Structures are given as C-alpha cells and as structure tokens.
Image (cartoon, rainbow, N blue to C red):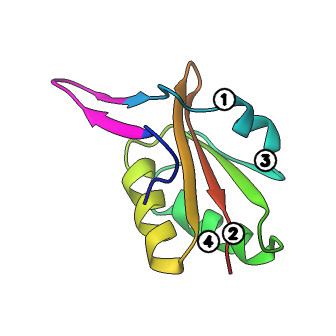
Amino acid sequence: MLSGKNRRLKREAGPLTFSTENTNIRDMERANRILDCRDELCPDPVIKVSRVLKTLPVNQVLEVRATDPGAVPDMKALAERTGQELLGIFEDAEGVRILIRRLR
C-alpha cells in the first residue's frame, strides 16, 4: 500500500511509469540502509529485501534499487504481506528506487 499524498504508480501504454508528483524526493536521503538489487531477477530481490528488513530496527527505512520489472509488484506485495509501509517508488536513470519503512 502506498502512503502519503498523491504517490501513484501509473500504467500507461508501453512500459511501467512512475509518478513522483507531490512526493518528497528528500525521502530518498532518509534511507537508513540501501540494498542494491540492480541486474538481479526474481525471486532474488524480494528474498534479499525480506532478509534485510528483519535486521532493521523498527521505523528505519530501506531503499531498494532494482532493474527487474517485477520488483515493484513484488515489493508492494511483500510490504502488504509483512505489514511494512511502502513510502515511495521512484524511477531514475539507473532503474527503480523503492522505499520501505519497517513497522514491526
């Protein structure tokens, strides 16, 4: 589940695009840990994120960097299933950055 105002994932004709409209990009600076999963394919990113989240203290933020097109739906499902907060999804030249806050 996306939280905050106007954070949306849009699907248009063609590839997946992301909206950061009214999203605070400085959230990226608040990540307590960065996990680089670029060039890794499913299921590796979601397995690594699950393991790292278990090591983070509650309320800390994990930034996941990924290039796998399945990373976004996988991280959304992981956050929902484990009760974590998906703070944002951002696209940049290097792929996708996903922010997840550990809630429990």
- The location of residue 103, given as percent across then percent down, is 67, 74
**Residue of label 3:** 31
Compared to 5, does 2 lie above or below? below
**Residue of label 2:** 102
Residue located 56% across and 32% down the image: 23
Q: Which one is in front, 23 or 88?
A: 23
Q: Which one is in front, 11 or 70?
A: 11
Q: Which mark is residue 50?
A: 4
Amino acid of disc 3: Ala
Label 4 vs label 2, nearer the camera: 2
Label 3 vs label 4, nearer the camera: 3
Q: Are marks 1 and 2 in contact (CB under 8 Å)?
A: no
Element under label 2? Answer: loop
Q: Earlier in the sequence, mark 3 or mark 4?
A: 3
Q: Which residues are the magenta region?
A: 8-17
Residue 16 is inside the magenta segment: yes
- Disc 1 crowd rating (10 Å Cα; few below 14, some 14-19, many 20+) is few
Label 1 vs label 4, nearer the camera: 1
Instruction: Assign the magenta stretch its main secondary structure.
Output: strand
Q: Earlier in the sequence, mark 4 or mark 2?
A: 4
In the displayed structure, does residue 45 sit left or right of residue 17?
A: right
